[in-house]
Amino acid sequence: MVVIRLARGGANKRPFYRVVAADKRSPRDGKFIEKLGYFNPLAQGQAKRFELNVERINHWLAHGAQPSNRVVALLKEHRKAAAATPIVEEESAA
């Protein structure tokens, strides 16, 4: 079974996570199938807190992958941020 979960990286007391699609049997920080984004819980200022490849995440979910609780929360936060962002239409040069 494929799961979408976080794989920890970073230094001691400075976590940084990759969002990955992995086989359920593989270790948390071990082998994975595809990198789908990242999550930086300590981001400050202009640094991005997380970035997700939603298109690929939706692909894996459509093929039966199970997201972890934290990934579900990140997806909800991403959708909320996307809805709050105003859509700017480009002016066409006629």
Image (cartoon, helix red, strand yellow):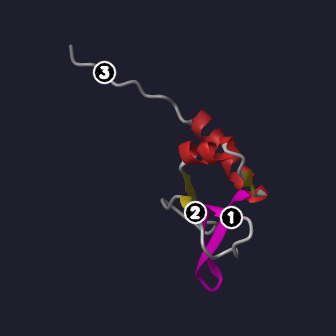
Pointer 1 or 3: first along the chain:
1
Q: Does 68 sit left or right of 93 as displayed?
A: right
Q: Is residue 5 magenta?
A: yes
Residue, disc 1: 23
Of 25 and 85, nearer the camera is 25
Q: Which residue is mark 2?
A: 33
Q: Which mark is residue 91?
A: 3
Q: How dense is the environment of label 3, judged by Cα within 10 Å: few (below 14), some, or many (20 and up)? A: few
Residues shaded magenta: 1-23
Q: Nearer the viewer, residue 59 or 11?
A: 59
Q: Position of residue 33 (x, y in %)?
A: 57, 62
Residue found farthest to the bottom: 12
Q: Secondary structure at mark 2?
A: loop
Among all residues in the image, which is located at the extreme right? 69
- Which residue is located at x 63 percent, y 48 percent? 60
Q: Position of residue 64 (x, y in %)?
A: 72, 46
